[in-house]
Image: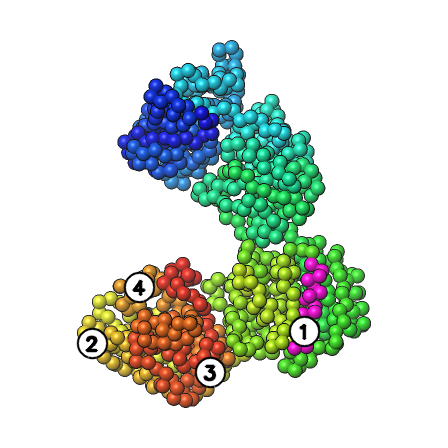
């Protein structure tokens, strides 16, 4: 028949439907030997019933899936499993069945399940979910009973306890109940009794060849259950590294006969195979055996497995084999690995993080393979990518192109002397294209006196010395061709996984490198620091390229309460950290028709890579012009309201508007729909209080909706004054919050985000209106489907979803096109911007390209109504 491995089939004989991790007492096999001997021998399958303390003490099974009454599913007899605990005393370390209770085990001073972890007091439930052994009829790990330090020893057919003074009467009674099992364990003869229907687990054989287990930086609170767990794997020895104290030494003293000892580092282990274990983990059944089999494959230096979070049950799904590039990008939070000693020695590992060790091994040519075992990780803290990849000790290449501008060099040198990334973790490359010997000598003098230990000064000839300061519009191609040569030289020099590029006229914050590295995630190719252009004053950060030209849609800074690390299309190279693999894979060039190397670089970069900007890291551009202004001094308001009397959504919209009414110093025109079921116009006007507004009315149209008043509103401000801008919006969601096409909460967040983004920082809108005729949020382009609107009649190639936008009066009213392109359709107002202007004439201040506008999770901050 099949051998016992811990997981068996169980029939739910309790009479109730049960959830995952509930408990059943073991009644009997489903098929008795007298009924069908062959089936009994070949299939371990039992009937589980409601626990009875007298019958099922130490004889229970934990369900591993929901199970209806009378149905058969999977249950665990031996191993590690979540289980709900009825915590009677926080000091209890054991658990067993409770009379007629299927949803939990109760804790005690003794029992058949050792509690490996439980939630602290006050976490909820009976004391929370604990994680322990539910091991039927077997206490082979029970040589140490609890924290009182009681030791047990076989003396003939009796059991000796020491020290006896610590043995309570209650504990003595419970141990006497388990005497037969304990005697078999102490004699290492776990035979199945003749009258026993189910087999008991055989001890795990000692792995061949012998394996040393190393617990790195042991923790007092987890050491005891971890030792219990590891000893069940039968290693040749257990070595504990890290700092020690009196309490740790006291625990180890009890395990001295089991070959458990302290050592300085993992290389002090005795055997050729070394298992490195985190103190927050437990090994699943046969983990060492699986690992020993896999590491025998050709060229394998280390093996790992998936792990399961004890707190949530979430499980990893690592690839079967890891590569160096995959580790540098995604990493692996392997809490336990088995490694060859020769591989460990080759990278001189002294006990650092396991994922860094795996990266070193992979770079050294060793194969890294996964085996089918499982590790249980007891950790609730979510590490950042920076922490998970251990980027704090990372060595980074700092590459600075020097154009020879003498007036800039002192400020750059001062920055290099004050920046905070450790000097020993930087490979500094100064690429000098000045062609000026006196400037180069000044650079060499600085190098000689600096405390950077790894500096290279590369002189790269330039066809035009002083090119950086020549009029850019006349030298655009020459400058960008020179930058391609410079960055292709950088590609030849790269030996680190990350490279920081800093141009010689950019001065970042002194802690810039750590801040940019902390913004990386596993899919990010680059993280940029924003700075303003020396030519037009806009940020050199863009959301997309403009079609038919080398231009880009430049971005403005997000509002302070929005995420400051933002996904972008591309940025300038003034201050940027990139993955070296991205640069190595992509040569720099400037084909005919191209004029900007950085725009092309990001355009041809694979779409699977994210490009990020951290707006908190703005740099000083030593030669940029002042922040530009649009010259707009007058701001009009056009606003449509359909005031349904059946709800107050229109009034919630007005309240959002009232908070910002002082922004509008020009005309304030409010169009109110009238008709049955609508609030009277004078009541709507009263909602604006003392604010001066002009109210116009039109009969409500269920077909045209807000579009019924769109042309009259435009006519009220039809003045092509170049110093005037107009904001158009409408009371949004007046019907949809009650009968919404999407999530009503998402509808609220959507409309309130538009008020916030378009009205709470005029300087952002003002800057965008310099080069753009119209500015909004939630911009969507749909060249392939002009009739994207629900009415099937309105048409345009792009739109602002929600129909909130600013426009420059001069751009709209200089001709009659604004009237000609209007459509008398239900979504005509939303389609109007895309019919009035080309996409390239628009700008989006937030949520550009967002399609799932009703999804509440898309909004940050999530602004509720008032």
The residue lying toward the viewer, choosing from 644 and 274, is 274
Task: Bin the neighbour count of mark 1 within 10 Å (Cα to Cα): few under 14, some 14-19, many 20 and up.
Answer: some
In front: mark 2 or mark 1?
1
Tag 3 near tag 1, CB within 8 Å: no
Task: Bin the neighbour count of mark 3 within 10 Å (Cα to Cα): few under 14, some 14-19, many 20 and up.
Answer: some
In front: mark 4 or mark 2?
4
| Circle 2 residue | 675
Question: Mark 3 or mark 1, which has the lower sequence index?
Answer: 1
| Circle 4 residue | 741
Mark 4 → mark 1, Cα distance in angstroms: 52 Å
Extent of the magenta region: 477-494
Locate residue 548, reporting x and y percent. Answer: 53, 78
Locate residue 225, reporting x and y percent. Answer: 51, 31
Question: In the displayed structure, would residue 62 be above or below residue 322?
Answer: above
Q: Residue at x 69, y 80 (%)?
A: 470
| Circle 3 residue | 632
Quadrant assignment, res 539: bottom right
| Circle 1 residue | 481
């Amino acid at each position: 028949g099949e051998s016992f491995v811990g997981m068996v089939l169980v029939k739910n004989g309790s009479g109730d439907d049960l959830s995952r991790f509930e408990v059943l007492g073991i009644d009997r096999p489903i098929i008795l030997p007298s009924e069908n001997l062959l089936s009994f021998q070949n299939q371990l399958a039992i009937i589980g019933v409601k626990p009875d303390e007298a019958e099922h003490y130490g004889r229970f099974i934990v369900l591993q899936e929901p199970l209806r009454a009378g149905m058969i599913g999977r249950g665990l007899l031996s191993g590690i499993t979540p289980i709900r605990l009825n915590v009677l005393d926080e000091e209890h370390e054991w658990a067993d069945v409770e009379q007629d209770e299927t949803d939990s085990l109760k804790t005690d001073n003794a029992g058949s399940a050792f509690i490996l972890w439980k939630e602290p007091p006050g976490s909820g439930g009976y004391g929370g979910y604990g994680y322990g052994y539910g091991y039927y009829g077997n206490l082979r790990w029970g040589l140490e009973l609890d924290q009182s330090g009681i030791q047990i020893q076989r003396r003939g057919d009796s059991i000796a306890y020491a020290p006896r003074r610590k043995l309570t009467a209650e504990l003595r009674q419970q141990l006497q109940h388990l005497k037969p099992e304990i005697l078999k364990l102490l004699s290492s003869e776990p035979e199945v009794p003749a009258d026993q229907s189910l087999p008991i687990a055989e001890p795990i054989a000692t792995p061949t060849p012998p394996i040393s287990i190393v617990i790195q930086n042991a923790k007092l609170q987890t050491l005891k259950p971890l030792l219990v767990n590891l000893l069940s794997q039968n290693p040749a020895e257990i070595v504990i590294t890290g700092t020690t104290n009196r309490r740790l030494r006291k625990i180890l003293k009890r395990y001295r006969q089991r070959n458990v000892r302290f050592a300085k580092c993992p290389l002090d282990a005795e055997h050729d195979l070394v298992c490195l274990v985190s103190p927050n983990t437990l090994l699943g059944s046969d983990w060492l055996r699986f690992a020993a089999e896999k590491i025998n494959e050709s060229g394998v230096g280390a093996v790992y497995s998936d792990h399961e979070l004890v707190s949530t049950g979430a499980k990893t799904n690592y690839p079967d084999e890891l590569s160096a590039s995959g580790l540098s990008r995604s990493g692996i939070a392997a809490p336990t690995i088995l490694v060859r000693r020769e591989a460990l020695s080759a990278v001189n590992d002294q006990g650092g993080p396991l994922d860094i060790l795996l990266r070193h091994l992979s770079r050294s040519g060793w194969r890294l393979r996964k085996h089918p075992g499982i590790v249980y990780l007891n950790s609730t803290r979510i590490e950042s990518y920076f922490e998970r990849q251990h980027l704090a000790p990372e060595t980074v290449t700092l590459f600075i192109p020097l154009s020879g501008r003498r007036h800039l060099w002192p400020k750059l040198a001062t920055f290099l002397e004050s920046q905070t990334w450790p000097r020993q973790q930087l490979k500094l490359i100064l690429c000098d294209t000045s062609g000026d010997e006196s400037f180069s000598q000044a650079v060499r003098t600085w190098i000689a006196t600096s405390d950077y230990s790894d500096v290279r000064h590369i002189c790269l000839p330039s066809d035009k010395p002083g090119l950086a300061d020549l009029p850019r519009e006349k030298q655009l191609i020459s400058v960008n061709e020179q930058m391609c040569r410079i960055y292709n030289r950088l590609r030849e020099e790269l030996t680190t996984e990350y490279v920081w590029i800093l141009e010689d006229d950019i001065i970042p914050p002194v802690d810039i490198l750590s801040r940019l590295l902390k913004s990386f995630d596993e899919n990010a190719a680059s993280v940029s620091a924003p700075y303003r252009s020396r030519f037009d004053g806009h940020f050199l950060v863009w959301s997309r390229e403009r079609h038919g030209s080398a231009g880009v849609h430049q971005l403005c800074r997000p509002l302070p309460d929005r995420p400051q690390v933002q996904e972008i299309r591309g940025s300038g190279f003034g201050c940027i950290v990139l993955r070296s693999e991205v640069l190595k894979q992509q040569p720099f060039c400037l084909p005919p028709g191209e004029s900007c190397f950085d725009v092309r670089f990001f355009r041809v970069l694979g779409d699977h890579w994210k490009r990020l900007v951290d707006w908190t890291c703005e740099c000083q551009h030593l030669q940029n012009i002042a922040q530009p202004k649009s010259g707009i001094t007058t701001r009009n308001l056009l606003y449509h309201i359909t005031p349904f009397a059946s709800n107050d959504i229109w009034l919630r919209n007005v309240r959002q508007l009232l908070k910002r009414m002082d922004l509008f110093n020009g005309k304030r025109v409010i169009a109110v729909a009238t008709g049955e079921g609508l609030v009277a116009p004078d009541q709507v006007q009263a909602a604006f209080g003392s604010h001066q507004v002009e109210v116009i009315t039109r009969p409500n149209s269920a077909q045209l909706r807000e579009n019924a008043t769109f042309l009259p509103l435009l006519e009220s401000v039809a003045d092509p004054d170049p110093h005037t801008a107009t904001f158009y919006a409408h009371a949004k969601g007046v019907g949809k919050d009650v009968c919404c096409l999407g999530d009503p909460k998402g509808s609220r967040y959507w409309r309130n985000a538009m008020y916030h983004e378009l009205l709470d920082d005029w300087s952002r809108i003002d800057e965008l209106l310099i080069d753009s005729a119209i500015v909004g949020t939630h911009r969507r382009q749909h060249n392939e489907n002009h009739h994207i609107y629900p009415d099937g009649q309105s048409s345009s190639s792009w739109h602002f979803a929600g129909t909130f936008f600013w426009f420059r009066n001069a751009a709209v009213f200089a001709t009659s096109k604004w009237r000609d392109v209007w459509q008398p359709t239900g979504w005509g107002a939303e389609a109007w911007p895309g019919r009035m202007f080309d996409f390239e004439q628009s700008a989006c201040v937030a949520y550009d390209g967002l399609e799932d506008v009703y999804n509440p999770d898309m909004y940050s901050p999530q602004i509720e109504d008032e």
